[in-house]
Structures are given as C-alpha cells and as structure tokens.
Image (cartoon, grey):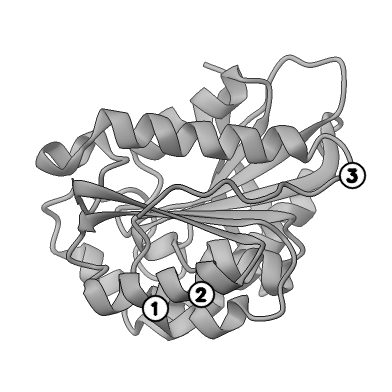
Amino acid sequence: MLGKSIKIRSSDGGEFDCYLAVPHENRQVPAIVLASAVHGVDGDIVAIAEEFAAHGFIAAAPDLFWRSIPGPLSHDDGRTQQRSQPRLEKIKAGERDLTDTLGHLGSVPQFNGRAAVMGFCYGGPYAILGPKRLGFAAGISCHGSQMLDYIADLDGGSEPVCIIWGDRDHRAPPEVLDAYRALSARTKNVELHIFPGVLHGYMMRGARKAFDQKTRDFSMGRALAILDNLRGTKTQGPLRQAS
C-alpha cells in the first residue's frame, strides 16, 4: 500500500484524519481529493485512493464527519444519516475541510499545485463547489446526491466538471437528470454521463447489489484522464456520451 492515515490541522481549530496515498514519483504530479459518501473513509474509499496512487497521482481522503461521528461506518449503521444532517449545513462545514486538505497537499513535495476533487453520493456536491470556490482545478461526481441544490453554482464556471449517474439511481430522479442534461447541453465545461440500469452507489463494492464494475471502470478512466490533463496548463475539455 502507498497510503497511510495522517492528521490535518483544521482552520476551525482541532484536527481531522485523512488517508493520504503518495506515489513513488521523482516528479511533481497532480492530486485528487476524495469526498466520501456518508459511510466515510471506509475500505472502498481507501481502495480508490490506492488505485489513483498506483497510477502515479497523489490521493487524499479526509474524514468529513470528524465534527460529529468520526471514522468509517458500515452500510447498515443507522448513524450514517444522523451524522450527515442537516445536509446543507454539513456540506458547508466540509468545504473548510477540503480547503485545509488542499492546503496540506502544498507540503507534499510531489504535488504540482493542481488538484481535482472527486465526490461520491454525499460528497458529490463538492465536485461543483471545489472548482467553483475552493481552489480545485476540476471536479468529478459519482452517484452524487442533493445535486439539484448546487446546479446554479455551475453557471459561469470554466473548470472541467464531470458528473456520472445511473438512470436507476434513487438519489437522482428524472427531474434531476433532466435538469443536468439541459445544463450540460449549454455548458462547455460540464460533461454528463448517465448509464442505463445502474443503481445508486455503483462505485462501492460494499454496496453489494448496486456495485457495477463497468461503470466504476469508466468513472475511474474519466478521472484519470482529467488528472492527466492537470499535469500541464491546459484544462480538460469535455468528453460527452449520449444519455
């Protein structure tokens, strides 16, 4: 394994855990910050961080729930909903954690100063908020939830944002998908991919029935391509898939 758990000092005071995976590189490379689902930095998130590091990128996964119920929780733990509510307030607090994580990456010698944020379910909105106002160069959302509350934040942006859902995702009903289809059709920097028959939580092996290897592979491929483009100065252009 290339990663380990570290502590990051919060700008609010206190500190929070973060899983940090740094590749063995003799050059500076981009980073990706993983904004977890409500289950926290569990085995699925650690595996994704390790995969990015194995491809030569820095990966960091902060504990966004350290202020309430810290650490990973199982999929059947009833406290997951407790620690994520009220949702908009908790998302706002997590913005500071992502900013602090990005600041910590500045102390990693291999970091080239450019990072993407990749959000899953609860963490999906950070794919929009990260590039919009937190200093990230790109965002990727996989089966994001509460996304209609943040669609207006995509107006006027220029950083690449990639949003991926399944059309059987109960957290992305038809009105949400239609709103994002309309936005991506008129917005050059936003790419949208909607996969038929795919459920909510397709990235996570721990989600059992929802896990979808093909869609996970596609999502990792898009994220890796976006990161690869952050090695230089040119921003990643959209790659569209019919939906």
C-alpha span from label 3 to label 1: 31 Å
Image quadrant where residue 165 sits = bottom left
Q: What amino acid does circle 3 point to?
A: Thr
- Against 215, residue 156 (above or below) is below
Is residue 176 rendered to the left or right of residue 232? left
Please tell me whether mark 3 sits on a helix, a strand or a loop: loop
C-alpha span from label 1 to label 2: 6 Å
Which numbered disc covers residue 179? 1
- Against 101, residue 27 (above or below) is above
Badge 3 local density, few (<14 within 10 Å), some, or many (20+)? few
Return the x and y of residue 117 as percentages of the image width and height. 60, 53
Which numbered disc covers residue 233? 3
Q: In the rendered image, which residue does mark 2 sit on?
A: 183
Q: Residue at x 86, y 28 (%)?
A: 28
Is residue 179 rendered to the left or right of residue 105? left
Answer whether labels 1 and 2 touch (C-beta < 8 Å).
yes
Return the x and y of residue 176 as percentages of the image width and height. 32, 75
Q: Nearer the viewer, mark 2 or mark 3?
A: 2
Badge 2 local density, few (<14 within 10 Å), some, or many (20+)? some
